[in-house]
Amino acid sequence: MPVGTQGTVKTLSPDELEQIGAQIILGNTYHLYLRPGQELIRQAGGLHQFMNWHRPILTDSGGYQVFSLAELNKVKIEGVRFQSHLDGSYHFFTPENVIEIQRNLGSDIMMALDECTTYPCTMDQAIESNKITLDWAKRSLNAFLNSQPLYGFEQILLAIVQGSTYEDVRQHSATALVDMNFPGYAIGGLSVGEPKEAMFEMTDVCTKILPENKPRYLMGVGKPEDLVEAIGLGVDMFDCVMPTRNGRKGTVFTRSGPLVVKNATYKGDFKPIDSDCQCYTCRNFTRAYIRHLFKAEEILGMRLASLHNLYFYLEIMFRARKAITEDRYQSWKREFLELYKSNNDIIT
Amino acid sequence: MPVGTQGTVKTLSPDELEQIGAQIILGNTYHLYLRPGQELIRQAGGLHQFMNWHRPILTDSGGYQVFSLAELNKVKIEGVRFQSHLDGSYHFFTPENVIEIQRNLGSDIMMALDECTTYPCTMDQAIESNKITLDWAKRSLNAFLNSQPLYGFEQILLAIVQGSTYEDVRQHSATALVDMNFPGYAIGGLSVGEPKEAMFEMTDVCTKILPENKPRYLMGVGKPEDLVEAIGLGVDMFDCVMPTRNGRKGTVFTRSGPLVVKNATYKGDFKPIDSDCQCYTCRNFTRAYIRHLFKAEEILGMRLASLHNLYFYLEIMFRARKAITEDRYQSWKREFLELYKSNNDIIT
């Protein structure tokens, strides 16, 4: 899912997202709640109308941003009090009002408010935090069941597994949430600084418990190689700013690995970013031109790189789905990773 | 002509420019010469290939930028020595090498190097400067006739009338250039700080001399009302950064005048920028959404506003052409200006 933090996937138009085959985009409840605010979006007829995006939208719960962006945050069992990173104003998120906000936004897929542990945290902290997240999940479900969609289409609610890097806590979290019978589950609290092995280990712990016939969503992941690995562990959905954020900074993804296209190496390189890619950028523009745009600080450079990167990510998912249905995922994954590691540009 | 200073019309893709009906775009010789350089563009197969724009390109002579942007500039009869605004390096433009650069760029319409007087300047300065410009026009024509296009299509060369705000000097300049028989003429050195009446007076002086059956191009103009006025004086072509620069700053043009769409007034305004406009922006997005994008510093805001503004400008030209062919230009102009003055947002 391309990330549309503030009601727009950075640098791109809804038309372009449709053309590259984006199916769901993500909106950030925390950001949209602060600006332009749920009232304005409700007046606009919901986020779909407001931003002119007529395919599904998933909104996160705001939890992650409250813990990573807000100036101050204080968790009580009732909810979390925080200060806006924009103007320092005070706000209070509860499982209940986060459902209400997401009703006003009108996202197709809503997320239950969770407490996202930082990495590292002690096992006691993880257990304590998980208790709160499970309580909030139950309250979210109640609030969801006791409220109605506003714009004439159904909304669903997913819950988020937490538990840091502790297998027991993850298992407890996943099992308890499965008991509440959500229509799908996210794996949260990963990709927050832990070693990559721990991330995959915890993902594996979760997907072993989360039902196969419901969507499993690994939040905030990741690099192309991470997606391919996690899909192998049974993950169905991802969101990540990597393709757009890297694109805006002049790094692009190719079948043979990432390229820092604004580097001097590509000054006179008249090949497309990826010769096998069919996106608008690769069909029409060279690395030399895109590098020039970055050097000249022209916005079209960011657009073309973001568009290509999202296309590349969506194509990974498309090809992974195909390989799965044709029962050849492991061999496809091996080939993908082998080729992907052949380029030398290092990105962070 | 939308302005594509550095090989891109700011924020927009070539596809979008085609869709809004742009016929010619302008490239700046000074900027492209400094970055990415004529050698690279030649290697790319010319500017059309480099930027993937397959309709006509006009390149200016670089004169205006040398006099307005470069750190230092010193005019001799041979040419003008200047320091790059990018890195302070020294360069020398002559009528001859400016033709060579434009051959390398492969623009369809090239401009002869001119000296652009500042405003105000004395009559003596204007006469002296005009002497140089006329000499350079002759040398440009010789260089043009003694060189060949590089990419298999014809290029033409236009000359630029100078003379500041002095009727006699303008007449002398225009007459002398007409004698050299260029396929079209530009009116330069206006819109540089002189009173608007002087601009139209000088335009009128020039168009009375410049042949009706060849294109007449008023450089660097202007606001919608200026275009409409100048068309009434016989001008055929314009270039101006107004639609794109204003768009990037959150000002949009409508039939009833400009709007500063990022103003708080439009916070809850769910109408399109211009209800009668058929552009992508107006068909799909509200003022409230575009205002949100500007407040949140999202690039899509600049894109949507630039796209609309260029569409609006191109439509003025389209409607003006239609009114002329239907012999009702004066009445169309009156109606346009009356409606255009009805909105109150002030822009500079």
Image (cartoon, coloured by chain):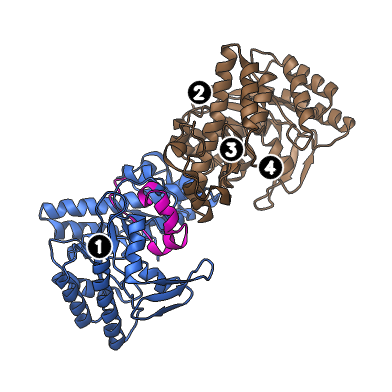
Chain colours: A blue, B brown
The residue tagged 1 is A157
Within 10 angstroms of label 4, few (less than 14), some, or many (20 or more) residues?
few
The residue tagged 4 is B348
* B85 relative to A298 in the view: left or right: right
**Camera-side residue: B251 or A284?**
B251
Distance from disc 3 to disc 2, alpha carbons, whole Å, reads 30 Å
Distance from disc 3 to disc 4, alpha carbons, whole Å, reads 12 Å
Instruction: Name the image quarter holding residue B316.
Output: top right
Q: Chain of mark 3?
A: B
Mark 1 or 3: the one toward you: 1
- Give how far across and how far down residue B186 sits, in percent: 68, 25
Cβ–Cβ under 8 Å for marks 3 and 4 = no
- Give how far across and how far down residue B258 sits, in percent: 61, 38
Q: Quadrant of the C terminus of chain B?
A: top right
* B142 relative to A317 in the view: left or right: right
Within 10 angstroms of label 2, few (less than 14), some, or many (20 or more) residues?
few
Secondary structure type for disc 4: loop
**Camera-side residue: A12 or B175?**
A12
| Amino acid of disc 1 | Leu
Q: Chain of mark 2?
A: B
Mark 3 or 4: the one toward you: 4
| Number of the label disc, if any, that sits on residue B153 | 2
